[in-house]
Amino acid sequence: SLFKNRQFAGAIAAQSAHFVASSGPFVLIPFYLENVRHLQPSQVGMYLVIVPIAMFTLAPLAGRLSDKIGFRILTILGMSGLAAGLFMLSRLDVDSPGSFLALSLMVVGFGVGLFSTPNSSAMLGAVREDQRAVTSSILATNRNIGMSLGVALATGLFSFFQTRFEGVGSAEAAFVQAYRPVTYVGMGVALIG
């Protein structure tokens, strides 16, 4: 039925990879900002809002563009943008400038915005009109599963590496060292997806 449709199956697999890749590193960013950078919650919120603003800016444009040129190029560019942003996040250090963090989050947001709308369009465009309600529910379920897997993978990896790096210096340095492998895994998943 739906999963025998190659376009639908490919789009749902790419969406899974997207959420696994992005959700794990993002769940740790507030802890980096509070525990490593020692920012106040209001300052943390100002950084966290960068990703949705970038997504909100680019997603409608990506949707219109995908109607003209198709979804493939845009979804590939979006996942590549996500991977590039995660690579930038992997370069964070204890004393990284706030502007570098903001730029990294903006690149991630642009990648997510460039990917999401064309990918959703590919999923919905691959099914008959009478299958769209079921498709939407699969899309939502897949998003939740991808995010749950991404968070579980990231926090498990982070915990493992934080224990390994505990004695290499300050708690802040250990956090940064443990965060890097999480972003590398996210990058790898994004590039495979």
Image (cartoon, grey):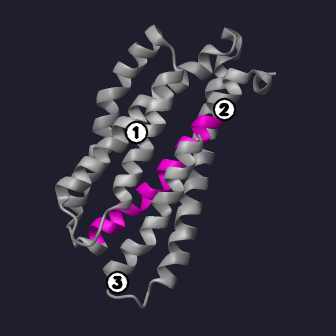
Separation (CA) of disc 1 from disc 3:
31 Å
Question: Seen in the image, is 129 located left or right of residue 183?
Answer: right
Q: Is residue 43 above or below residue 76?
A: below
Q: Where is residue 34? Give x, y as percent.
A: 28, 69
Residue drawn at (40%, 39%), measured in percent from left and top? Answer: 81
Magenta part of the protein: which range? 13-34
- State the separation of the CA atoms marked 3 and 2: 41 Å
Up/down of 68 relative to 56, above or below: above
Mark 2 or mark 1, whichever is nearer to me: 1
Q: CA distance from mark 2 to mark 1?
A: 25 Å
Quadrant placement of the C terminus: top right
Whether the residues at callouts 3 and 2 have beta carbons within 8 Å, the answer is no
Left or right? Give the position of 192 relative to 94. right
Taking the spot 44% from the left edge, 31% from the top edge, the residue there is 77
At x 38%, y 60%, the residue is 90
**Callout 1 secondary element:** helix
User: Which sits earlier in the primary sequence, circle 2 or circle 1?
Assistant: 1
Residue 155 highlighted magenta (yes or no): no
Query: In terms of secondary structure, what is the magenta stretch mainly?
Result: helix
Give x and y (percent) for residue 127. Answer: 68, 15
Residue where numbered disc 1 is placed: 81
Label 3 packing within 10 angstroms: few (<14), some (14-19), many (20+)? some
Looking at the picture, how far across and down is residue 126, in whole percent? Answer: 66, 16
Q: Which residue is mark 3?
A: 171
Direction from residue 171 to residue 95 in the image, left or right: left
The residue wearing badge 2 is 138
Helix, strand, or loop for circle 3? helix
Q: Earlier in the sequence, mark 3 or mark 2?
A: 2
